[in-house]
Every structure is written in structure tokens, then in C-alpha cells.
């Protein structure tokens, strides 16, 4: 593209809150055929709220929530904030935790009210050898509603589950359609579980889902798709997403997210919704068309 056409495009982008790093990023974004998007904070608001508390036998909902919130007070994960906030809203007194430990992509553990407590996803429970079967029907129902379920264990026994819902952004569905119209295949990559991820993907018409992903698996996915000849753009907001953004042909950072994500990106969206990606694609394709 000519320097003039690129300046025009980047200027128009900036006006709409779409910051394009350089000519290369713009040109590459015109030609990619695959867009990988993180779920939490990209497709959804990224502000989950506690919706359900299901206690196992011998436990009250408030006791369960107190243990969960006590543990999560030590975590900065959005899921943790939802649990602590939910406990406060319900008037549950939140105890302090000791021996706090976070396991990336899985959950947290520690000592609360003199008990060894662990909270996290199915992989976390599997690691600890804890059977989640007693609440599996309820778990599956909640996940099919697109909610994220976390298991709480006391010692080696399942104490219950807590579920949160993270609403889909109002702009997401229409933006996904527009991106399809502009020739992109869309893949959701998420650390969340498969049933929850698929419930959300099917509401949005997303082409493919990769669930249960650890951060390094997101960049492996980018590399694998590129090795097969795809041109890959990756959009995400988290610290977790930075390696995958860097591995993509074009990394797209949601400017509302972590600084490292922005540093790894060719395109930064000041407003954290997918419409910025639609805008960038339109500008990129128009610029390329003008010079061919
Ligand atoms: P993502 O942002 O894509 O969901 P994460 O790596 O942040 O990916 O989290 C992956 C999964 O690990 C979460 O969906 C959750 O099940 C579990 N997890 C991680 N941290 C916590 C935490 N502090 N509390 C509960 N669950 C957690
Ligand atoms: Mg995330």
C-alpha cells in the first residue's frame, strides 16, 4: 500500500479508537483468514457475577460461600472477585485464609477456618483426587446455561459448587456476523470448560471452540494453525494472552486489558469490543484493494 493510503487508514482507525501499529500490521490484517478470540473479557463483559451456590450434604450454602470467599480474597482472578463480591452481597462473613496458593489455569487452595480448602475447575479436583460425581447433574445444567462452575473441596471431600455468569457483551453477536461477512473463520480459545464455552459459542455462531486451554496452549494453537497455512489474528485481553498475541500474524489487544497484551499487539482497541476488529478489517481490506 502507498504511505498515503496507510496514513489515511491508520488515521481513520485512530479516530475510532483502533490503534494500528504500522503498515505491516495493517497489510497483514487484510489477508488473515482466521481470528482466534479469548472468551472472558473479549466476547463477554469480563465481569462475572455469582449466580448459584450448591452445597453438598452436611454443609449450608452460607458456610460453603464463606470458605470459598475466604480463599478467593487472596486472588485477583475475575472469578475470585465475583465470589467475594457475591458473598458480601449475601451478607456472609468472610474469614481469612492462610497458606494461600494459586495454581495457574486451575484454581486456588489454602487453609480457611482451620480447614484445608481447595477451589477450582475439574482439572484442579482431578489433580487432588476429588470425586465431583455427586453434583454432576447440577454442574452440567449450569454449564449448559453458559455459566462457569467451580468446585470447592474441604480436605479430600467435595463440599459443593459455586457458579458465575459472565454476560456476553451487547455488541458481540453483531460483530461476529460482520467478521464472518469479511471472510474470517472465528475460533474461541478459553481456559474455561468445554460445555460452558460451547453454550456461549453456539449463541454467537462461532465456528470452533478450544476449551480448557492453558495460556501456553493458546500460543501453540496459533503456531499449529499457521503451520497449516492459515493467516492468524489473535484477540485477547489478559496477561495470559500475551504469548499467543505475539505468536500470531496479527495480535489484537483489548486496550481495557493488561499492558503486556498491548505491547505484544499489532492492533490495539481502545474500546474493548469486537466492533473495533470489524473496523480494522474494513480499513485494512479497503487499503489493500486501493493499491491492487
Ligand atoms: P480464562 O481467562 O481463559 O478463563 P484462566 O487461565 O484465567 O483462563 O482460567 C482458567 C480456569 O482456571 C478458569 O476458568 C477457572 O476454572 C480456573 N481458575 C483459575 N484461577 C481461578 C481462581 N482464582 N478461582 C477459581 N477458578 C480459577
Ligand atoms: Mg482471559
Image: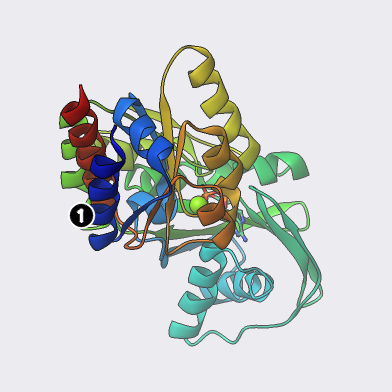
| Residue 197 point in image, percent of width and height | 40, 40
Name which quarter of the figure residue 206 lies in: top left
Q: Secondary structure at mark 1?
A: loop
Question: On the rendered structure, is 288 left or right of 210?
Answer: left
Question: On the rendered structure, is 144 left or right of 64?
Answer: left
Q: Is mark 1 within 8 Å of ligand 2?
A: no
Which residue corresponds to the image point at 40% horizontal and 30% vertical from the top-left?
209
User: Which residue is denoted by mark 1 in the rendering?
Assistant: 171
**Is residue 80 placed above or below 32 in the rendered structure?**
below
Which residue corresponds to the image point at 26% horizontal and 53% vertical from the top-left?
13
Give the colouring mode of the picture.
rainbow
| Residue 244 point in image, percent of width and height | 56, 38
Label 1 packing within 10 angstroms: few (<14), some (14-19), many (20+)? few
Question: On the rendered structure, is 96 left or right of 78?
Answer: right
Name which quarter of the figure residue 3 lies in: top left
| Residue 253 point in image, percent of width and height | 44, 51
Please identify the residue farthest to the top as the structure is shown.
228
**Residue in front for this viewpoint, 272 or 25:** 25
What quarter of the picture does the C terminus occupy?
top left
Question: On the rendered structure, is 270 left or right of 157?
Answer: left
Which residue corresponds to the image point at 24% horizontal and 29% vertical from the top-left?
288
Which residue corresponds to the image point at 78% horizontal and 66% vertical from the top-left?
110
What quarter of the picture does the N terminus occupy?
top left
Amino acid at each position: 500500500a502507498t504511505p498515503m493510503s496507510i496514513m489515511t487508514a491508520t488515521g481513520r482507525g485512530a479516530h475510532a479508537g483502533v490503534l494500528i501499529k504500522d503498515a505491516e500490521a495493517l497489510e497483514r490484517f487484510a489477508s488473515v483468514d482466521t481470528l482466534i478470540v479469548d472468551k472472558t473479557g473479549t466476547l463477554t463483559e469480563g465481569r462475572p457475577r455469582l449466580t448459584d451456590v450448591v452445597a453438598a450434604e452436611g454443609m449450608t450454602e452460607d458456610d460453603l460461600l464463606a470458605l470459598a470467599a475466604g480463599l478467593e480474597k487472596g486472588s485477583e482472578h475475575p472469578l475470585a472477585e465475583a465470589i467475594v463480591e457475591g458473598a458480601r452481597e449475601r451478607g456472609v462473613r468472610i474469614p481469612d485464609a492462610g497458606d494461600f496458593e494459586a495454581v495457574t489455569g486451575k484454581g486456588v487452595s489454602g487453609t480457611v477456618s482451620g480447614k484445608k480448602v481447595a477451589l477450582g475447575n475439574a482439572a484442579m479436583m482431578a489433580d487432588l483426587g476429588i470425586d465431583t460425581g455427586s453434583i454432576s447433574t447440577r454442574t452440567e445444567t449450569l454449564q449448559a446455561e453458559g455459566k462457569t462452575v467451580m468446585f470447592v473441596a474441604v480436605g479430600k471431600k467435595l463440599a459443593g459448587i459455586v457458579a458465575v455468569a459472565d454476560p456476553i457483551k451487547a455488541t458481540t453477536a453483531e460483530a461476529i456476523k460482520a467478521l464472518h461477512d469479511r471472510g474470517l473463520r472465528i475460533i474461541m480459545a478459553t481456559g474455561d470448560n468445554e460445555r460452558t464455552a460451547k453454550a456461549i459459542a453456539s449463541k454467537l455462531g462461532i465456528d470452533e471452540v478450544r476449551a480448557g486451554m492453558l495460556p501456553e496452549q493458546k500460543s501453540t494453537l496459533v503456531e499449529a494453525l499457521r503451520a497449516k497455512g492459515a493467516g492468524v489474528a489473535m484477540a485477547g485481553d489478559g496477561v495470559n494472552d500475551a504469548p499467543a498475541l505475539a505468536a500470531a500474524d496479527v495480535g489484537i489487544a483489548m486496550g481495557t486489558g493488561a499492558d503486556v497484551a498491548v505491547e505484544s499487539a499489532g492492533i490495539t482497541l481502545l474500546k474493548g469490543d469486537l466492533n473495533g476488529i470489524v473496523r480494522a478489517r474494513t480499513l485494512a481490506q479497503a487499503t489493500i484493494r486501493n493499491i491492487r
